[in-house]
Image (cartoon, helix red, strand yellow):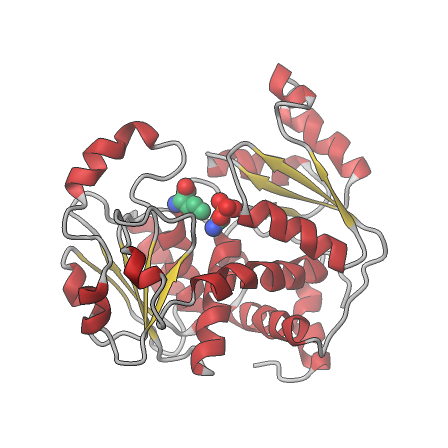
Amino acid sequence: MASTSHGVAAVLSHVKGSDFLSSSDFTSEQTSALLELAVQLKNGTRRIDLGNRVLGLIFTKASTRTRVSFQVAMARLGGQTVDLNPQVTQLGRGEPLEDTARVLSRFCDALAIRTYEQRELIDYADWATIPVINALTDLEHPCQALADFMTIQETFGRLKGVTLAYIGDGNNVANSLMICGALLGVNVRIGCPEGFEPSESVVDKARDLAISGAKIDITNNPMQAVRGVQAIYTDVWASMGQEQEQELREKAFQGFCMDKTFLDEADSQAIVLHCLPAHRGEEISSELIESNASRVFDQAENRLHAQQALLAALLGGL
Ligand code: CP
Ligand code: NVA
């Protein structure tokens, strides 16, 4: 692990100019260094001025945390963001992605994109000549995972050997947790209803990338998933774009509402995580979000620090 500012900068110098489309785009060492930089930015031992760089935000789905944390992160780095929502640009009137990506590359220094298909994100990255960041797709939410593991690290002072249980849908958040967890040596257990498991290719990828013997386990028994773990985590049952499946999912996910009985089954020091927005009384009880074990608002805050570190690394400001 890179333990000095110099070490962190040396490790992260290799990601300058890269895209961050998946948690697997960074190595274990780079992911650890990024979290270390995020902690330095959070505690004020590190300040970075990128000198008026501009991040373009293309969000075709709603967002509170991701959008605002990117805006504030750029402001703190001495830069700014521009809103490039499809509704207000020619994208919404059918201008081809390949033209848009090349034009925006002449104005901006990086793009953060929230959309449905991972393929669309990859197409942007292929045509853009600036770093492209995944701000959530149907496949992954890699910026979220950085903040999540930063929160676990700051609670327990370590990541290797820690076990995280994610209860619910094998979705974008679960996918990035498995991959990023594997890279950091965290055991990740997914407890999901039958038919809502994460895709095998992502599970295999996470297992291939795992360091320090980290295990990735999938089970349909949620209580078994949380037994003895240090962190329990959940997310909505119907993600953005799946609204029409809400009713079907409410039936399929019976028994998967993360409540006090789940926390009681976990380690006595276990913490509660949720990427937010939460549907209280659905995938998580209000009691759990408000409990002493809850770290959900630290987790939300850490989006800012983790993304500030990410932007500094991709834009080469170290
Ligand atoms: N967790 C998260 O990505 O929140 P937003 O949808 O509000 O950005
Ligand atoms: N899985 C959720 C995460 C929201 C931050 C979604 O994609 O809607």
Residue 292 image-quadrant placement:
bottom left
Residue 302 image-quadrant placement:
bottom right
Residue 2 higher or lower than 131, as above or below: below
The residue that appears at 43% across and 77% down in the rendered structure is 159
Judge by depth and name the residue closer to the eye, 91 or 256: 256
Residue at the farthest right position: 51
Coordinates of residue 311 in the picture (x, y in percent): 68, 57
Ligand 2 lies in quarter: top left
The residue that appears at 46% across and 34% down in the rendered structure is 116
- The quadrant in which the C terminus is found is bottom right
Q: How many marks?
A: 0
- The quadrant in which the N terminus is found is bottom right
Coordinates of residue 289 in the picture (x, y in percent): 35, 60
Residue 245 image-quadrant placement:
top left
Residue at the farthest top position: 93
| Observer able to see residue 175 | yes
The residue that appears at 37% across and 49% down in the rendered structure is 278
- Relative side of 117 to 111, left or right: left
- Relative side of 294 to 73, left or right: left
Residue 41 higher or lower than 242, as above or below: below
Coordinates of residue 62 in the picture (x, y in percent): 51, 36
Coordinates of residue 81 in the picture (x, y in percent): 73, 44
Residue 238 higher or lower than 265, as above or below: above
| Observer able to see residue 139 | no
- Relative side of 315 to 295, left or right: right
Judge by depth and name the residue closer to the eye, 302 or 297: 297
